[in-house]
Image: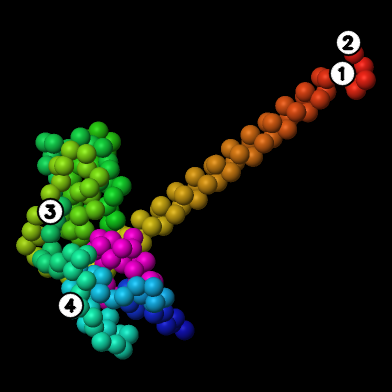
Amino acid sequence: MARTPDLAERIDAFLPQTQCARCGYAGCRPYAEAIAAGEADIDRCPPGGDATLAALARLLGRAAPPLDTSRGMPGPLQLARIDEAACIGCTLCIAACPVDAIVGAQKRMHGVLAALCSGCGLCLPPCPVDCITLIPAGRDWTASDAGAARERYGRRRERHAASRAASAHAAGAAKRKAAVAAALARARARRGAPPAGRTT
C-alpha cells in the first residue's frame, strides 16, 4: 500500500527547491518541516513568490499573508557565473552550493553547471576573491528543475550526514585508543613502582 505523504512532504512539494535559505532554514525541506510544526509562517519564500504563497495557503486552508519582502524580492531566475581568470580554486563555493551545481578541484578553476544552478546566491559570500556574480538565466525555473534540485539537495544532505557520522566515529575511536593507552601507561607505572613501605 502506498504511503500517504505527511504534511511536511506536501508543503515541500509546493516549494521551489532553490534551497536559497532566505527563509531562515537550511533548505526547502527544513522550511517545510518548520511550517508543518507551526514554527514558521508561509510567507518566507521570495523565489516562490505569490504563487507559492497562495498554494501553501490553499493547502493549509488559511488566508495568504503578504510575502515577507525583508527576505528578498521575487524575480526572474538568475544563475551564478564564475570569472575563470580570477578563480583561485579554493573550493569554498563548491562547499556552499546546496544543489551540487559547481564543479572543480582544489587549486583548479571552477565552473557552474548552468542547467543545475538554482540561482540561490549562497556561493557568493564565501568567495574570497569575489569572482562570482549572478546573471539573468533567460529562462524560467520549472517543476522539472525543482524536482531535480530536490534530489540533489537530498543526496548532498545524506553525504554530509554520513561524513559527520564517520568523523564522530573516528573521534570516538581516537578517544577510546587514548583511554586504553593511558590505562596501559598507568598499569606499567604501577608495575615499575616499589611495593608500598619498601624503599630502594
| Amino acid type at mark 2 | Thr
Question: Mark 2 touching mark 1, by CB under 8 A?
Answer: yes
The mark found on residue 200 in the picture is 2
Identify the residue shown where x is 22% and y is 47%.
125
Q: Say if residue 39 shows up in the picture.
A: yes
Structural distance between the alpha carbons of marks 3 and 2? 79 Å
Residue 102 image offset from top left, x and y in percent: 23, 49
Task: Please name the residue that numbered disc 4 is placed on.
Answer: 50
Residue 116 image offset from top left, x and y in percent: 21, 58
- Is 145 or 40 nearer to us in this picture? 40
Structural distance between the alpha carbons of marks 4 and 1? 82 Å
Q: Say if residue 55 shows up in the picture.
A: no
| Amino acid type at mark 3 | Leu
Q: Residues within 10 Å of mark 3 (few under 14, many from 20)?
A: some
Decide: is 148 above or below 131: below
Q: Nearer the viewer, mark 3 or mark 2?
A: 2
Identify the residue shown where x is 54% and y is 42%.
170
Start and end of the magenta stretch?
A: 13-34
Tell me which label, 4 or 1, sits earlier in the chain: 4
Tell me which label, 2 or 1, sits earlier in the chain: 1
Task: Please name the residue that numbered disc 1 is placed on.
Answer: 194
| Amino acid type at mark 4 | Asp
